[in-house]
Image (cartoon, grey):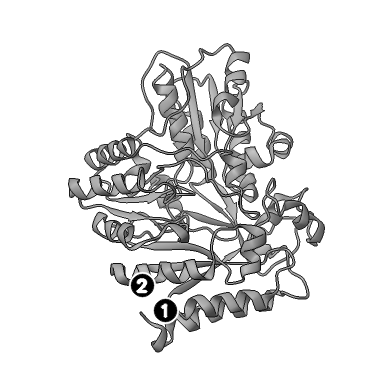
Amino acid sequence: MKSSSHGPHVVLINPPIYDFALYDLFLKPFGLLRIGKWLEQNSYEVTHINALDYSDPVSLETLGKPQRRRDGTGKFFRQELDYPENLARIPRKFARYGIVKEELLRKIRSLDRKPDLILITSGMTYWYRGVQEAVELCRIAWPGCPVGVGGVYATLMKEHCLKVCAADFVTKGPVWPGMKEELEKRGFPLPSGAPGVDYMNDDPVWRDSAVIRLNEGCPFNCDYCASSCLSPKFQAGDPGQAIKTIKALYERWGTRDFAFYDDALLVDKEKIFIPFLKEIIRLNLPLRFYNPNALHIRYLDENVLKLMIRAGFREIRMGFESSDDDFHEKKDGKVTMDVFARAVDALKSSGFPLHKVAVYILAGLPGQRWEEVERSIRYASGFGLRCRLAQFSPVPGTALWDESVRTSSFPLEEEPLYHNSTFFSMEWEGFRREDLERLKKLTRELYFRPEKRP
């Protein structure tokens, strides 16, 4: 997809992903297409190449059709690879997800106009090999064209990204003012202002489902979360702009399924989220909403839940993490057991179907014992709720990073692949892999026992 302009030509690339497992839970290049919109508004020509396009014709013919759901989630194209050399062995297969490599190179090579600048986004730190591949293909296709990398991995591990991916520059943190210096260096016209919350909504990536964000950042600073590293300040959003984006996508693509990318969707809800819900209800469009990022339990009440039901929310994911008061006192300060019980009462009184509610329990933190996780699972399941284990992934820049590096048997600082929760990098005598597997089984057993079904 490309826009038309006589200004500099910028190519945006959403790279493939290398991982042991990958499911598309509304995984969209949100930040990348926000940059694209900003550049378009400042007379740049923008082309987007999506290596995760699950409808690519050449890849369909080569690899077959990935299984997809009607809500826009599902599987990507997958090619199994040899297990990475010099990596500790685990009983999982390694794979590349995305359109076939030769087709990605062809797409980069066959641009109608030579690019003046190429920008590649990045996600999880342990997905860096997809970024590395994208940079290499850009060097083959357009030698001499400057290539920059931004996004999560670029922010959390800038030096590693510069060294291993060999981009010309890496922007850390928000793209503006981070990119200003890079554009000035290369003589590009400086865009006015900063990127807004709007994105390139004419891109076909939104045809099956879309994402929106009301608020930026999070007012909490949890020890295990990187939100404050990526967005240092909580910034209240504009419900009117979010509504405008939703209407534009519904009219352009018929998009009905929308996922929130907020880390703190319910914060200051009376001024932001509730007005948004009321306007959605007034519009009376056939929309469905999801929150893959967990909601803060302390802000759930009967009123907002009833509005969410009327607006079309299909699920509630709650960030509970642990039933241990000491855990919350030391690591996040987000919730108490009384707050959790009140939230469950609000869910029941609102009429939200409990089988559509999931409670996240954190497992595998440094020094955490399996018994704590089991107590948390049994506690939350006792309310008739489904628990999901959220396996801890060590993240550079968080309060738990240094402790993770000290206690892990893996070289976390040298090899980001070990940040992948699949490695269970905090395994110790008090919490073994077999304990983790047993706890996963327990969450299923407790939820599907007849007396526990809502």
Q: Are marks 2 and 1 in contact (CB under 8 Å)?
A: yes
Q: Is residue 419 above or below residue 46?
A: below
Q: Residue 368, how many percent across, how many down? A: 70, 69
Name the residue type under label 2: Leu
Q: Is residue 355 above or below residue 40?
A: below
Residue extending furthest front?
338
Which residue is labeled 1 in the image? 384
Distance in Å between CA atoms under marks 2 and 1: 7 Å
Left or right of 401 on screen, residue 210: left
Which residue corresponds to the image point at 36% horizontal and 62% vertical from the top-left?
Answer: 315
Which residue is labeled 2 in the image? 354
Which residue corresponds to the image point at 26% horizontal and 37% vertical from the top-left?
Answer: 248
Asked whether the viewer can see residue 132, the reply is: no
Q: Is residue 360 above or below residue 203?
A: below
Q: Residue 70, how many percent across, how many down? A: 31, 58
Q: Is residue 134 above or below residue 116?
A: below
